[in-house]
Amino acid sequence: MIKKIILSACLLISFVSLAQQGTASPYSFYGIGDVRFKGTLENRSMAGVSVEQDSIHLNVDNPASYASLMQTTFTVGGTYGTSKIKSDTEKASTTRSTFDYLLLGIPMGKFGAGFGLIPVSSVGYKIRNDNSDVMGETSTQYEGEGGLNKVFLALAYKIKPNWSVGADMQYNFGKIETTSIEAITGVASATREINTSTLSGANFNIGTMYQTKIYKKIQLFTSLAYTFGSNLNSDSERTIQVDGEASTINESGTSTLNLPNRFTIGAGVGEARKWLVGTTVAFQGNGKFENYYNTSENVRYENYAKYAIGGYYLPNYTSFTNYFSRITYRAGLKYEKIGLVVNNESIKDIGFSLGAGFPITGTLSNVNFGIEYGKKGTVSANLVQENYINFSLSFSFNDKWFVKSKFN
């Protein structure tokens, strides 16, 4: 009964949270918005490094990981973030609270399954150019909200004790709404344009994980995942209002956006349940993200690339006398080219993360906390730079949920 209450409460929280604004970045104006981190807080605290076949933590970056689960694992996470946005002449601060994921992994002998709900991207910006003090000049205001989410179902199989393979199917869905207002100083009327796009589409991901002993207790961990390119259907509606509702024009149409293929490879060395140092690199092709409301002559898209290094240290997970010895300490560094070029300037995201996993005494469950500090963009080329700090929290519950009772 308690498990059902926990599950129902978390489902309610997650769906309510999906309606919240998940970003405050001006760069979310372009494409499908600000692409969110795909993974759990445990991996995020290591800058995205996820190469170990873990028995109690989920790894949604590689579906082969589910075959290594020993207990049913349910996890939910969220983030509170602050950002300082600056240009050559102005500064602003923003805050936001976001839902990050809701996941369930189920062990089934040599098989493992997983499913969950994850936000893929978020749109959330307010941009204003005020020239109201100059007669005849145009003042503009742009606002956007929404984003793309996905639900997925994964299945994995352990070919050998140290080698597993897996695949997942993902269904993407979401809505993006943008509003732009233009007014000329000295002219009574203003023009408002409202665009709403409903997005939907499916894609597939495959992966494999392998580990082997290389020296005494030291093991080599490897991970390889590939996401196939896919299409997103965009059903759009446009409403143009001139002078309030005095003159209204409604338009609708359908377009296709392209999500490019993605290749992720990682490797690390360490001692299981003790320490790990690893690296992950990811490459993604140049997709087609333009919709009629977010095109611009000074914007183009390029290949995405990410380089990360990170790891963890667990002093003594079997200690009965020292709780701090059972805490998992994590850290990582990342460098990303997010695939967006504005004013011929490639937008980059550089960040550093720290985290800790606190075990719940008497169980394999844990509470995880993480801090991420980073910088996105630049003040060069008339652009803006974001300095952000994210505080994340997750709960991971591990138990044998599906064991048949031996007693009535």
Image (cartoon, rainbow, N blue to C red):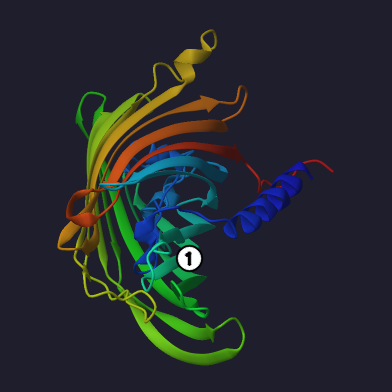
Q: Is residue 314 above or below residue 61?
A: above
Residue at 27% from the left image edge and 69% from the top image edge: 261
| SS category of the residue bearing label 1 | strand
Q: At label 1, which amino acid type do we have?
A: Gly
Point out residue 164 in the picture as x, y percentages from the top left corner: 34, 52
Classify the position of the C terminus by image quarter: top right
Residue nearest the observer in this picture, 345 or 373: 345
Residue 13 visible in the current orientation: yes
Point 71% across, 45% down: residue: 6
Task: Please tell me whether residue 269 is drawn above or below residue 154 in the rendered image.
Answer: above
User: Which x, y percent locates residue 145?
Assistant: 51, 64
What count of labels does the image hold? 1
Q: Position of residue 57 (x, y in %)?
A: 47, 40
Q: Nearer the viewer, residue 328 or 191?
A: 191
Q: Is residue 166 visible?
A: no
Residue linked to disc 1: 144
Residue 36's quadrant in the figure?
Answer: bottom left
Q: Nearer the viewer, residue 121 or 312?
A: 121
Does residue 89 lie above or below 148 as drawn?
Answer: above
Q: Residue furthest right?
A: 408
Q: Residue at x 34, y 67 (%)?
A: 30
Residue at 46% from the left image edge and 20% from the top image edge:
317
Residue 81 rendering spot, x and y as whole percentages: 47, 41
Among all residues in the image, which is located at the extreme left? 344
In the displayed structure image, the side of residue 26 where residue 282 appears, left or right: left
Quarter of the image with the N terminus in it: top right
Between residues 110 and 241, which one lies in front from this camera angle? 241
Callout 1 crowding tier (Cα within 10 Å): few <14, some 14–19, many ≥20: many
